[in-house]
Amino acid sequence: MENMNAIEVEGLTKKFGNNTAVDNISFEVKAGEVFGLLGPNGAGKTTTLRMMTTLLKQDFGTVKIFGHDTLKESRIARSMFGLTGQYASVDEDISARENLMIFSRLNGLSKNEAKSRTDELLEEFSLVNSADKSLKNFSGGMRRRLDLAVSLITRPSLIFLDEPTTGLDPRTRMQMWDTIRELVDQGSTIILTTQYLDEADQLADRIAVIDHGKLVKIGTPDELKKNIGGTKLQFQVDEKEDIPDLKNVLENQLSLESTFSGNQVQVIMSEKNQLVTILNVLDENNISFSHLIVQDPSLDDVFMSLTVGKN
Ligand SMILES: Nc1ncnc2c1ncn2[C@@H]1O[C@H](COP(=O)(O)OP(=O)(O)OP(=O)(O)O)[C@@H](O)[C@H]1O
């Protein structure tokens, strides 16, 4: 299964009235990959995910799950994945154990199988001590772990996670990331939607950036960062009078893109070794400086350059 595509999406399109929520999106997800759908509010991530998971019918385009068309072979396609997220349907009035038992039976497990799978999942998701409490007393993190446990009852090799850490505190988010990484280590393919750049950066092998229903860029986090250009160098000159000469050298002699604000200087370097040249210039011209920072492009920069001001 290693070289197989877990998902093939082609020309996927959905309109709500005049609003094209998803506009002719195509991509593939390889088996074993963590694939992130990243975009600002209202970009179309959830609508894309809902179509991929057969909760919503597309207007145009196709989705294949391990080769099975979600419209023509919906039962088989549906049996191949687990879904966790904004529309998980666990019952608030009963306990975690009861929820897991009910969903296990609904998924066709015998009473004994359901019991042992429930015990396994409670253990795996650190819910043993709270197993018999009503969900009303659950924290956001515990609730999210139960949602994920429920979607894993049938041990699907493909898991869809819709905004898995939205609303969680930083510690619980990191625990959730660890849980997701463990699933990946066990060989699962994961599709996740997120508004958080650090989450996509931490977890995803490849990221599709979506904005206004369109797929604007796809690649590994590193590819996306490289794509938007160079390393940023920032420093502060001690004497403001040095700025005009420095500006002249940086822009006219070295042809470097630079911006100046008060004593602050920012230079974009296409090659990291330009740092040495710039430091030499400062030294030769006796320009004293402080607060030097060298920063590789972040996914924040990618996100801003691809989606800024549009939503
Ligand atoms: N059921 C619906 N009826 C009408 N419009 C909808 C419906 N669902 C989504 N939309 C619209 O489609 C667009 C995409 O929404 P979607 O929920 O897919 O975005 P998103 O990227 O998941 O955003 P968020 O991060 O806020 O969840 C938005 O303009 C939204 O208002």
Image (cartoon, rainbow, N blue to C red):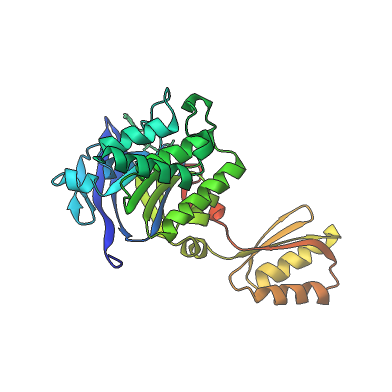
Q: Tell me which corner region of the image, top left, top right, bottom left or bottom right, holds residue 279.
A: bottom right
At horizontal 58% and vertical 70% (from top left) the residue drawn is 270
Q: Position of residue 45 (x, y in %)?
A: 38, 42
* Residue 43 at least partly seen: no
* Residue 274 at least partly seen: yes
Residue 280 lies left or right of residue 251; in this view the side is right
At horizontal 47% and vertical 65% (from top left) the residue drawn is 223
Q: Quadrant of ligand 1?
A: top left
Does residue 186 sit above or below 195 in this rendering? below
From the viewer's side, name the closer residue of 265 and 127: 127
Q: Tell me which corner region of the image, top left, top right, bottom left or bottom right, holds residue 117.
A: top left
At horizontal 29% and vertical 48% (from top left) the residue drawn is 81
Q: Residue furthest top?
A: 93
From the viewer's side, name the closer residue of 87 and 29: 87
Residue 143 lies left or right of residue 78; in this view the side is right
Q: Position of residue 33 (x, y in %)?
A: 38, 60
Does residue 201 sit above or below 286 in this rendering? above
Residue 196 lies left or right of residue 120; in this view the side is right
From the viewer's side, name the closer residue of 46 and 214: 46
Q: Residue furthest left?
A: 72
Q: Residue furthest front?
A: 112
